[in-house]
Image (tube, rainbow, N blue to C red):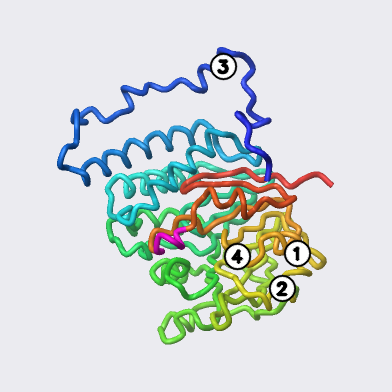
Amino acid sequence: MCLITIFSCNRLPESESSLSAMLEYDVPGAITVDSPTNFFGRPEEYLEWEAENTLRLVDEILLRFPPDVEENILRYSAFQMLDLVFHDVEAPNRPAVQNFFHNRFERATREMEETSVEDGAMIWKLYNMSIVARTATVTVCFDLVRAHSSRVEEFAVPDNMMMPVIDQCDALFISHRHRDHADQWVAQTFIDQGKPVVAPPEVWEEEPIHDHITHLERLAHELQVLPVQSGQQELRVVVYPGHQGTTIQNNVPLIITPEDISFVHTGDQSNDEDFEWIDKVGEFHHVDVYIPNTWTTDPQRAAAGYNPALILPAHENELGHVIAHREAYILNYRRWNVPYPVLMMAWGESYHYLAPLN
């Protein structure tokens, strides 16, 4: 991970005037019009007001300074502010947080609908470990959920907001059974559309949906073929036999698209014995984009095993987790201080990945 700079090397302002324009912000106009002069005796009202104004500022920073492997101090500040707001026990109950999530989700959905890819891959991070990746020929998603794991109905994405995302994806990969990674309504919608859902055998094993899920073999390094788009395209897939802890099956799929762009999504893989195959992944397959949970076992060793072109940490600020395990974005700067490019992304952000030239 690169040291934080004032600006990304790829986005250096050309002049003092352009620098001024990039930093211009109408502070008085950004504060909500109906703000009272004080909040005496109304602490909860203040916390909601604070969250609303903080998230408005964060949204503006993230829009002006999109994801880049060359991190800058403004994006770092935005992640710090997000951690502060999201580490409030009441965060998923706050309308400001709900609106922030929904607005960014909708913006990402509109971008997906308007985006075609000619080279490389577009990657969207929607929430937690919900990732959508698109190349010129296919669109796949991982652990796509509506966020009911937050236990707050108003925070979760409504069905009609999720449908456009599902409509654009060709296949869904589910890492394991926990509800912050597996959403049965989402999976059933894929199946109803005739699209494959790949998951470990123990996901919904007592439910009727189980017979309609694709259970690829959990074999380290072994390529399998998954037809998509009614057989018009094929994905090459390795399903690494991962585990969360010692007992929970956790698929770690390595997906290779027709363009030979590869993605690894780890779900909640965290098990020392899995290093038997993690240490060798890079010897068997090229990994373009490695998407680990931020708190995975031994990030340094894991990164070396996958040997990726890009690391995209995920699973920060799952609002259904207790505060101590509601992983902060800024912990990534320490955990993933590894000799590989690392990209930090917030909810609803996208990134155009271009494979490095050999």
The answer for how far apart the CA atoms under marks 1 and 4 are is 13 Å
Q: Badge 1 local density, few (<14 within 10 Å), some, or many (20+)?
A: some
Q: What residue does disc 1 label? A: 305
For the residue marked with disc 3, what is the amino acid?
Answer: Ser
Q: What residue does disc 3 label? A: 18
Which callout, 3 or 4, points to the residue nearer the camera? Answer: 4
Residue at 52% across, 16% down? 20
Residue at 41% across, 46% down? 84
* Residue 25 forms part of the magenta stretch: no
Residue at 74% across, 74% down? 277
Q: Which residue occupies the extreme bottom position in the image?
A: 206
Q: Please, what secondary structure does the residue beneath circle 3 have?
A: helix
Residue 164: image location, x then y, percent? 42, 53
- Taking depth in this image into account, of 195 and 346 the one nearest to the observer is 346
The answer for how far apart the CA atoms under marks 2 and 3 are is 48 Å
Q: Circles 2 and 3: CB distance less than 8 Å?
A: no
Q: Which mark is residue 296?
A: 4
Horizontally, residue 219 falls left or right of residue 172, namely right
Q: Circles 3 and 1: CB distance less than 8 Å?
A: no
Span highlighted in magenta in the image: 321-326
Q: Which mark is residue 275?
A: 2
For the residue marked with disc 1, what is the amino acid?
Answer: Gly
The answer for how far apart the CA atoms under marks 1 and 2 are is 8 Å
Q: Please, what secondary structure does the residue beneath circle 2 have?
A: helix
Q: Badge 4 local density, few (<14 within 10 Å), some, or many (20+)?
A: many
